[in-house]
Amino acid sequence: MQLLSTLLPILGLSLSLSLPTTAYVLQDDYGTSNAFFDQFTFFTDTDPTHGFVKYIDRGAAQNAGLVSADGGSVYMGVDFKNQASGGRQSVRISSNKSYNHGLFILDLQHMPGGICGTWPAYWLLGPNWPNNGEIDIIEGVHEQTTNLMAAHTSDGCTIANTGFSGALQSSNCYVSAPNQASNVGCSISAGSAQTYGAGFNGGGGGVYATEWTGSAISIWFWPRNAIPGDVSAGNPNPAGWGTPVARFAGGCDVDAKFRDMQIVFDTTFCGDWAGSVWNSGSCASKAGSCTDFVANNPGAFRDAYWRINSLKVYRQ
């Protein structure tokens, strides 16, 4: 190319080639065997969001049937057999690796969402929160029907209401932003019921792709019957995917606000979000409080599980 650039002016011609963007190559394939869990750390401390939950370690989770892998998919669920007066058993895992930029593609067959009392999330989290950022890729509470995506940062990060198909809910990513409730951050809701909970599970799940570059963090979703061929083939090209459902960009230095983030999956109950909105939603008629419902209705949580077909991280 350098030789061509030198020769063309001599010949009186110009170079007007449109060069392709750098392709993504596979960095990490987390697989679907029990080795999947070797690449994660099980969180067993008190829930930072004050959930009515007891996070248990890998051994306890395996013995209780809360985690398993059969080579075809990975299962992560919650206890749905026992009364839980002190909090329902669940798992929260964080990847041993941390990332700076990348393309994260999750093929998910089933999620725990759409059930009263639940607050599941698939997210990216940096150390020393909120100084190194948080991106919530899948998140919701109770019988929510569409996905809510959000970013949480230190002061000085806002997003523009452009470049995505979802609906902007809040634009200031700072966790203590004025004129926003505490820790709302900047958030974008999806428009389709296929993106979360019952609608997602009823359609056999789908794929979430998250591209993190120095200029933006963008999220795409496709239901099971509309996954792009390049994604299925393992040669993902975001340039051909069209408008993302969410895009976090605008008045924000992405590289300054999002660093060294780990992949996190969890399912908690009640807590700061789900507990605070119990009385204002469709679940209030089921019990006097969120914790009462979660403690005394184990069978309600049989379907509160993640079923992962694949998790891959690509880099440029």
Image (cartoon, rainbow, N blue to C red):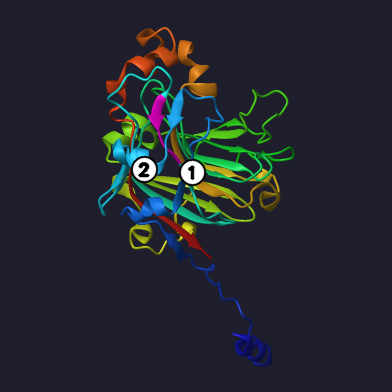
Q: Which mark is residue 272?
A: none
Q: Which of the two residues, 28 or 172, is positioned nearer the viewer here?
A: 28
In this picture, residue 202 sits left or right of residue 131: left
Quadrant in which residue 120 is drawn: top left
Tag 1: amino acid:
Val
Residue 22 drawn at (x, y percent): 53, 68
Amino acid type of the residue tagged 2 in the rendering: Gly
Q: Is residue 26 above or below residue 178?
A: below
Report which residue position mark 1 lands on: 264
Left or right: 95, with 178 as reference point: left
* Crowd band around label 1 with a 10 angstrom C-alpha radius: few (<14), some (14–19), many (20+): some
Between label 1 and label 2, give the one nearer the viewer: 2
Which label number is shown at residue 59? 2
Tell me, yes or no, if residue 32 can be seen here.
yes
Q: Nearer the viewer, residue 73 or 189?
A: 73
Magenta segment: 88-92
Q: Quadrant of residue 39?
A: bottom left
Q: Is residue 195 left or right of residue 98?
A: left
